[in-house]
Amino acid sequence: MKRVIFGALIISLSLLLQACNTTDPPPPDGEKATLELKLEDVSCIEAWIELTTTNLQLPATITLEQINPAGDTTSHIAILNTQDSLLYIDSLLPNQTYKFHTTIQAYNLTSNELSVTTMDTTSHNFTFETFTFGGTAGSSVLYDVAIINENNIWAVGEIYVADTSQNGYTMYNAVHWDGNQWELKRILYDGNIWTIKTIFAFNQNDIWFSAFVRYDGQKFIELPISPILTGWSINKIWGSSSRNLYVVGNNGNIVFYNGTSWSRIESGTELQFTDIYGASDPKTGEPEILAVCTRNLPLAKGIYRIKGNTAVEISSVPIQWELAGVWFIPNRHYYVVGSGIYEKKSLTDSLWLNKPLDITHYVTPKIRGNGLNDVFAVGAFGETLHYNGVSWKSYIEETGLNSGGYFSVCVKNNTMVAVGFTYQSAVVTIGKRTN
């Protein structure tokens, strides 16, 4: 299926014309040509419309008529090179109804009329509450967070609390929120405590703490350590189930768990993987998985697509600086973040685009979202950003930290949680949408 792009701001002549040097034979006599429009997806400002045709002689010139909410009409003209095409329309308004139909003058042919209502924006109205832990016996930090629901939140890292024990402190590696208060946790492996850098929760009875401990809702289960998991830092986990789990970390390591055993996926890089995210294509249902990696000195970065037992680097042009986070909805919108927020509509787009200064001046190492109209990014000095489908808003006046910053963020329904450090204390900020 070909992708045809319309919009006030985006007109891709190369996509529209690249197949014009080929001509399909004319349809058999007596077989009528047809046009049909079907809505595939919609955001606040975009629509993806599937155009299905039969018995057309290609290439053919089509006109897409867009009837706007005010009643005026916008016309888009394109060259159709395939029988089936995905039409992309941007520059729409949120929570408005548009009508579309296509015509081919050469055939005196008109499609069905398709009514499309764009998504509404989500509210920017959040209240925030910040909590700190440790800071009295060494530097404490939280690296990652998982939301089961607003009354069941886990965060992991290392927290040092001064006491009268032999060492003068007790180390904790997790905190749990029950809706009323936080409880410090010591999650052990083989009798020892360790720094936990990542957590991933499928549900309240299936929570992974790094790749070594799984919580079943009642107890912490220690898993055998495979040799391929040792000797490097595990930085992030993502999976669709406990039998389809990916772990990434330092030295270019990507490891897959099938529910029984671990296997290595060769990346061909020695860079530090800092994030991994996957989602199903809304049309095909096929999984798509991306991971980002980086190095500060000398500067290097990469974006990798994982498919089966292979990891292939994809274009990061023109990104020059570090990358730390990735989030996306396949074939709809892709974000990579770090020293800037970069985005694409499709991985086949030639460039990653960004607007560095009108969004934030601060490094943003992590991004997550509920949907195309509900995305959060967090970063240095407590920067917290929300995209509501049309605009970005910064909450740094409410969430700002004089020192430190946020390393990770999790979003679920109307709750967001960011974690990191400030001075020598670990920090958690909970944001709740008020309307």
Image (cartoon, rainbow, N blue to C red):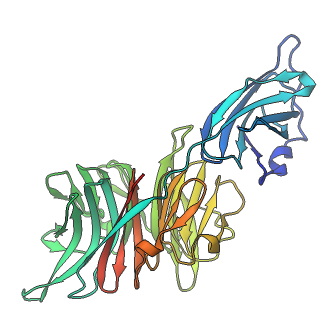
Q: Position of residue 391 (x, y in %)?
A: 59, 59
Q: Does residue 338 appear left or right of residue 164 in this picture?
A: right
**Is residue 199 visible from the viewing direction of this image?**
no
Q: Is residue 417 above or below residue 309?
A: below
Res 427 → quadrant: bottom left
Q: Nearer the viewer, residue 423 or 334?
A: 423
Q: Position of residue 195 (x, y in %)?
A: 26, 75
Q: Does residue 122 appear left or right of residue 348 in this picture?
A: left
Q: Is residue 74 above or below residue 367?
A: above
Look at 70% across and 56% down and name the residue there: 349
Q: Position of residue 39 (x, y in %)?
A: 64, 33
Q: Nearer the viewer, residue 93 or 413?
A: 93
Look at 42% across and 51% down and name the residue there: 435
Question: Can you say which quadrant of the picture contains the N terminus?
Answer: top right
Res 69 → quadrant: top right
Q: Position of residue 73 (x, y in %)?
A: 81, 37
Q: Is residue 9 above or below residue 229?
A: above
**Is residue 204 visible from the viewing direction of this image?**
yes
Count all numbered tags in the image, as a single digit: 0
Look at 21% across and 87% down and name the residue there: 136
